Amino acid sequence: MRVEFIGHASILVEVRGMKILSDPWWRGPCFGAQWWNYPNPVTDQVYKHPVDFIYISHGHHDHCHPGTLATLDRSSKVIVSSTLDLKPVIEDLGFEVIEVHPEQPFDLGNGVKIWLWPTYGGDTLLVISDGEQTCINLNDAIHTAPARIQERVIENLKQQFGRPDYIFCGYGTASHFPNCYFVPGKNPSLTARRRQQYFNRCWSDIIHRLQPRWGFPFAASVVFLEDDLLSLNEDIHNYERPTDVFKNEYPLDDTKVLDIAPGFVIEDQQVIFECLFAPYDNNVILDECREQYQRANTYGTTTDIYVEELVQLLRNNIEICLPYLIEYVKDYFLVIEFRGTDKGISVRKQGQNIYIEPITSLETAISRADLVFRTRAAYLRRSLTHQYGDEIIFVGSGGVFIYPTREHARLALHSELRVMITQHSHAPASRFGSSTPGVFRLKQVVKQLLGKRDRNADLYDLEAWTDFSSSASSPSS
């Protein structure tokens, strides 16, 4: 078995005369102009001879990238889980699609079998085995999942496959949170480091528990080139590496961990090409990615007619969500500011009513806002008109949330705005469940006193994840 790291979440497994490629993305950015591959993927072996199979783990654009898939030979068959709705999209690109049922072996021929396991949030993992060696591609499927799901999947993998030879496991945040939030006094650098440290430890813990012979971190070869987030690249990638965490926390483990870079190759337990991680340098990145940087910071024109269309789309979506939104007790005034323009939309809640209007004076509106959300007008439109369109914002970091004070940030108005700008066909379930508001709040207090807080919910607690160690936070204008 030969495995090559192509780049980001893409690996090429060659086993018994067949080639299996995973999650190809390298032609252009993904999530609009938000994520850019870095360092560049090494794709020579992909195009040298057509691959036999392409595995798509889930629908995020850094894993299912139509622009990259369009460059691949249509003789390749695409493998997806039957639990996902990816088949029509991929068939439209001209590929034959094989849907594999969850946790059931699928025979590729020549003694090679695969398993696809759904995990959490529409993600899946892939196991490839030829009866002698086993490679497990976890991509984003485990390290961001709730603890209970991690435990179940890890135990099932151990029971069914014993000690695997290779595990490729993601360690990236794959979220806008908390780096896209600006609060006075926030230290963006330390906040980014804290978040990444958490996922580095998740990676280390997963590798320790699964005990592969070889463990590799991947699926995080991404840089931000938009000015608001550019400075974070070095903090996210350089401060601490997941392989160093593993070596420090589990010095007695005999798993070999390598911090790989595109072009790395291992074959039958022997490293053939040892391409390893090199620290990110924003000066070098900008020098190498001048055209990409320009594109990431260039915004199209936004006409008054376009804004009016967005206002109507937002009104329609808020009307659908109103039963949920009016459960929020306080009144508020929000501003959606469109990048590269003097235009925006105001959202004002007053009692049981929410009013949405185009803004005539952006500067005045911002001065009185409880929260400003800055994004591209095209991103807002996509979020309101496409299923999963909100991923361009909330996965791809396609907007920044700006609070005027730390006290305003504690109101968590970004959670209300997220509901408003995500496409809905019906109102979300009540935030209080089947309880009355008073009973619900009492239960929350009791849970906190007993230490039974939801670990996954805590992952998105802005106050808890923001570092306020003496550094002002202000996005670029």
Image (cartoon, rainbow, N blue to C red):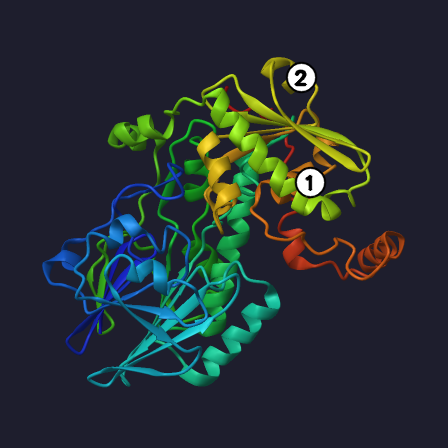
Residue situated in front as seen by the camera: 234 or 340: 340
Percent across and percent down for residue 166 are 33, 70
Secondary structure at numbered mark 2: helix
The residue identified by callout 1 is 463
Give the residue type that dot 2 points to: Ser
N-terminal of the two: label 2 or label 1? Answer: 2
The residue identified by callout 2 is 367
Give the residue type that dot 1 points to: Glu
Quadrant into which the N terminus falls: bottom left
Q: CA distance from mark 2 to mark 1?
A: 23 Å
Label 2: how many residues lie within 10 Å, few (<14), some (14-19) or many (20+)?
few
Residue situated in front as seen by the camera: 372 or 201: 372
Q: Residue at x 85, y 52 (%)?
A: 437
Residue situated in front as seen by the camera: 104 or 84: 84
**168 left or right of 12 in image:** right
Residue situated in front as seen by the camera: 412 or 187: 412
